[in-house]
């Protein structure tokens, strides 16, 4: 079977954890760059600051949870909690940031670019996802923003998010969520909660915590 042109292969750095995101086009999701401290701390915790842009931004693509599938290596998928609102998923085979989600019922997976295999896809990230539509929490950026940083979030963009998410939910695209058991709603891996000391060692201040819904 030839893979669908709009299927985006997913792969951790070492290739143990794999998956696929179906129907990935610039119109099928929402790409943004988050500069919040929790996203930065997540990358630092994994010793993967290389996934951040020069100002500490994380490139994230929000898409319907039901279109994301994990096909191999789920035994290596782990979860981290900075707050109970956001589940941060990564692999412990090679410390690849995978995705952010809210709880099992929220219809969105925020795929992190480091888990996307654009080489196997044959499309560049911009071709597959479109350019990032906005940035958020740039007050927490650790350096001047890169010249190609997306614009700040506009009110109209925020207003558009709610009907989009509601549409995904109504059309049943939010399930199954690959990171939660579809019946028991249990997370694929029990979230590890960092101690306050661990958190303090990852961030210098507490200005911007990741906002939670609708930007998980
Ligand atoms: Zn790996
Ligand atoms: Zn963030």
Image: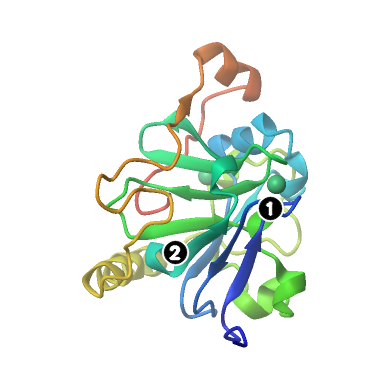
Q: Which secondary structure lies at badge 2?
A: loop
Residue sitting at x 36%, y 32%: 84
Regarding residue 214, the answer to whether it shows in the image is: yes
Residue sitting at x 50%, y 41%: 88
Residue sitting at x 57%, y 35%: 37
Residue sitting at x 68%, y 51%: 16
On the rendered structure, is 94 left or right of 34? right
Mark 1 CB near ligand 1 (8 Å cut)? yes
Determine which of the numbered discs, if any, sits on residue 169 in the image.
none
Q: Which secondary structure lies at badge 1?
A: loop
In this view, 18 is above or below 170: above
> Residue 5's x, y, as percent?
61, 86
Can you tell which quarter of the image residue 150 is in? bottom right
Nearest the eye: 128 or 1: 1
- Measured Cα–Cα span from mark 2 to mark 1: 33 Å
Determine which of the numbered discs, if any, sits on residue 154 in the image.
2
Nearest the eye: 1 or 185: 1
Can you name the residue that lies furthest to the top here?
Answer: 197
Instruction: Bin the neighbour count of mark 2 within 10 Å (Cα to Cα): few under 14, some 14-19, many 20 and up.
Output: few
> Residue 125's x, y, as percent?
69, 71
Q: Earlier in the sequence, mark 2 or mark 1?
A: 1
Residue named by callout 1: 12
In this view, 70 is above or below 7: above
């Amino acid at each position: 079977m030839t893979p669908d042109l709009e299927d985006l292969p997913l792969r951790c750095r070492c290739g143990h954890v794999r998956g696929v995101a179906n129907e990935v086009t610039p119109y099928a999701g929402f790409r943004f760059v988050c500069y919040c401290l929790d996203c930065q701390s997540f990358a630092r915790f994994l010793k993967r600051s290389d996934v951040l842009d020069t100002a500490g931004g994380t490139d994230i693509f929000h898409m319907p949870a039901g279109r994301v599938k994990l096909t191999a290596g789920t035994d290596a998928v782990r979860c981290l909690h900075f707050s109970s609102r956001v589940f941060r998923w990564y692999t412990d085979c090679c410390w690849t940031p995978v995705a952010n989600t809210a709880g099992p019922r929220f219809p969105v997976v925020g795929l992190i670019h480091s888990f996307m295999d654009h080489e196997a896809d044959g499309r560049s990230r911009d071709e597959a996802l479109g350019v990032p539509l906005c940035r958020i929490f740039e007050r927490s950026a650790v350096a001047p923003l890169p010249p190609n940083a997306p614009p700040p979030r506009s009110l109209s963009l925020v207003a558009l998010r709610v009907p989009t998410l509601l549409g995904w939910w109504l059309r049943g695209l939010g399930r199954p969520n690959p990171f939660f058991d579809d019946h028991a709603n249990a997370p694929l891996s029990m979230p590890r909660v960092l101690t306050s000391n661990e958190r303090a060692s990852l961030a210098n201040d507490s200005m911007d915590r990741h906002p939670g819904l609708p930007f998980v």
